[in-house]
Image (cartoon, rainbow, N blue to C red):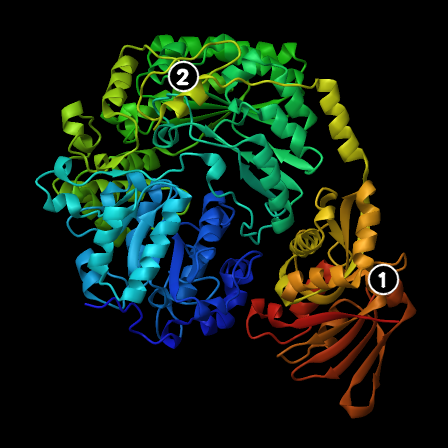
Amino acid sequence: MAWLLRGMSSESADFSAFYERVYPELAGHGVWLRGGELNTLARQEYRKREFRILFARLSTYADTAASFTHSLLYQIAAGVPGVYPDLSYLPPKQDRALFAQFEGAEVPWLLGTQSKQGPMGFDVIGFSLSLVQELINLPTVLWKSAIPLSKRERLRRPEVPLIILGGASALYSSVAWGPDAWVDGVFVGEGDQDIRSLLGMMAAAKTERLSKEDLLKRLAAEIPGFILPDESESAPSAQSAKKARKSYSRDLNEASTLIRGLVPFDSEVVGSSPVQISEGCPCFCSFCAESWDRKPYRERKALQISQAARAMKAAMGLDGIELYSFNFNMHSEFYRILWDLVPVFRRIGLKSQRFDILAHEPGMAEFQHVLQKSNFTCGLEGISSRLRRYLHKNLEEEQVMTGLGAIFRSKAREVKIFLVATGLEEDADFAEFSDFVERVKSVRTAGSAGARLIFSITPLVRFPWTPLEFGDAYPADHYRKIVEKVSAIVRRNGFEFREAADLPEYQVTQILVRGSDSRIGSALFRAVQKTGFVYYRDVPESFAREFEVGLRESGVDPTHALRGFSFEESRGKPWTRIETGVKREFLFEQFQSGLRFVEKDYCLGRSWKKARCLHCGGCPTRFHARDILLSKQERDYSLDAFKARVRASREDEGEVRIRVRAGEAARGLSRRMLGTAVARSLMLAEPKLIEGYAGYRMSDWAGHSEEPVYVTGEDVLTLSWNRKFLPELDRSLASESILARVNEELANWGEVVGMAGPDEEAFRRVLRIEAPFSSQVDAYLKDHDYKHTLRKADGGSYHYEFTPQVRRKGKMYQLWVLRKTPASMVLSPGPKFLNEEFVLFMRKAFRLPREQDWVRVRCEAQRGA
């Protein structure tokens, strides 16, 4: 059977008309489904590139669009010749009704944001599974997209695309595997070269007209980390099924770096992006899935990080950078990285770090404080030293106190302390935790700090391929009393307390991650069907109960589904078909050590401790092990020198006003997006400007507001720039060739005209307004008591001349209604007629069929007298 994946015509898969019809009613006026983000391919490329893949998320745009790994995946795919990648997101809750009925049919949830093509317009759907809980949504998303849940049926139908599952939680997706799997193939890992090979092989198979079955077999045979989720069912046992080594990059310095990342339509994250400084973790925390399935620990060299960060700044219009790492303060060149990035980035984000390292280098908190880091996290995990040993945390109470003392002295504003409820808590553990919290209070007082302290607890989920996969998990009710006791201790001492995960969500997640029985998948599907539940951020008690009912009806005792298993029993589990590199014997040894409350130190070299190799199997060569063991963090400059470097970079900033014409791509977005696009184009056109850019500040129309602006045309953007680069910026904007390159890069985002003159002000412009609706501007003017003289002009137009009292309000000077239906107007605004007033005018001055249709009104700012 030939692999003809688009039996429907391309027109039948195109849902552009749906988007154009409903976008005003969608969440955020449809920005999440709009497409056209910076660094995405032009829509025309869909026709030019023969192989099309849809990368689908099982969560919303708002929750996942800023994902580092998703953006890197898109960048890799876009760089493969002949491959067209597109993106799909879970529709927000409020938008599902609009998808349910359009011209008598349902619109598929799998809908490309860039091409507006439905699933039948693609050769492959690649689901990226970030959280295990997202598996709840997989059957619904397929069903809502007219794709069978049965692999057998999908393979029988040539028009249905292949369904491949990958992502950070793909290793824990066994509940979707089985004799008639929900997906056709599973890819586990993050090796960029393997991803390119996977895409290239699928594209070649389409050219060869290879059958789906033959392609899947080829992928399983040749691509590391790729398995067939139903293969173990045809083998005598899971032990005899083909094993696959998880895909990974041996040398991070040779792996792809995020450079041209997708810039999401989100004003909270635009202007900043993560740069990966390391991969994996050398620690052996028994609860941490990311640590165990991402070994070995690898670092990217500081020089390469600096070069990549500069390239990212230009390609994404950045003024901020975040160090992407499981523990940023482990990096052997951590201080060199900070030194190199300070002159280039106004903001440097630092998130997760090891507290034992901070304790041995308390001055590190001062360096972070210089970078204006004021929020810190502490992964305490176990509430007592006994339970931290069970979790192999390698963190003593004195280390925590030393680290907290350093943080409080640095005048932190907020400290979050993360706890894990293991289920093994006893009275002695609670007593020790009570003493600990009282000590924290004393340390904070001694540091003269008013930092806000938040304790957050989550029930322990025992993941496959961690030492705890062998242990018994506990039902949700078992954790309830533990959480209550911890909460009482924290609140008694005047601190805040939160539950990071609700107990119903814990229990559902725990059963799913170790789902080795196909009946569990059936029970999940049945619960989804009965409740219609779609997972966004929480699992309610009602769904957890229905899932438990489904388990019992399928013949699975929920209590049994939480039980652990022996080492021999573990060999038959479906996830063992993927080898992470770590020996399963080592996992079981660590599990047994934990039961004895004995821990082993991790293998990273530190200045105060000589490390040793525990032979876990995670390192593919002795050279990897050597680099980890001999790692040593050094600093070749003082705190005062660092302060001076930061001060020199920050204090020499000035603001520049740049005259622009906002284009169609900028319409309906925060002006920060346009500012980012302009800065990006300037830096790409003239690399000498990269170091000097320091961020977007405001625009004349929007002020400092982050609200969407629906005015195109003339505006003035205020950007921050290092003063020593201002002469270069002046030269660039005065150069016709450079300005041409800037505007070519901007494309439909707009046009840079040049530096704004000192008297260049928004209220000196006029607004040309065109609406597909009738005018009711008289009612608007009456409601706002805008007194005027109405004069009828030639051609049936009307001139509204406002009284001096109205003009003094600074909002409207004159208004011409050139045509009432469809409305055409020219408005001369005052200095106080900014974006908020403009939106109010659009909402009230026209007869709108639907409340949100005001966003269809087109408004262009033009130069006035």
Marks 2 and 1 in Cβ contact (< 8 Å)? no
* Residue type at numbered disc 1: Gly
Label ID, residue 790? none
144 displayed left or right of 771: left
Q: Earlier in the sequence, mark 2 or mark 1?
A: 2
Q: Please tell me how crowded label 2 is: few (under 14), some (14-19), or many (20+) other residues with Cα within 10 Å.
A: some
* Residue type at numbered disc 2: Tyr
774 displayed left or right of 262: right
Q: Disc 2 and disc 1: Cα gap in Å?
A: 67 Å
- Answer whether residue 350 is visible to the viewer in this image: no
Along the viewing direction, whichever of 80 and 718 lies nearer the viewer: 80
Along the viewing direction, whichever of 554 and 701 lies nearer the viewer: 701
* Kind of element beneath mark 1: loop
Along the viewing direction, whichever of 271 and 622 lies nearer the viewer: 622
Hey, which residue is sitting farthest left in the picture?
Answer: 236
Expressed as whole percent of the image width and height from the top left, the position of residue 280 reads 42, 30
Hey, which residue is sitting farthest bottom in the picture?
Answer: 795
Expressed as whole percent of the image width and height from the top left, the position of residue 75 reads 49, 52
Q: Quadrant of residue 46?
A: bottom left
* Residue pictured at 34% horizontal, 37% vertical: 505
Say above or below: 390 vs 760. above
Expressed as whole percent of the image width and height from the top left, the position of residue 863 reads 82, 70
| Quadrant location, the N terminus | bottom left
Q: Please tell me how crowded label 1 is: few (under 14), some (14-19), or many (20+) other residues with Cα within 10 Å.
A: some
189 displayed left or right of 709: left
Label ID, residue 602? 2
Q: Which residue is mark 1?
A: 810
Say above or below: 520 vs 754. above
* Kind of element beneath mark 2: loop
* Residue pictured at 15% horizontal, 43% vertical: 232
Expressed as whole percent of the image width and height from the top left, the position of residue 137 reads 33, 50
358 displayed left or right of 108: right
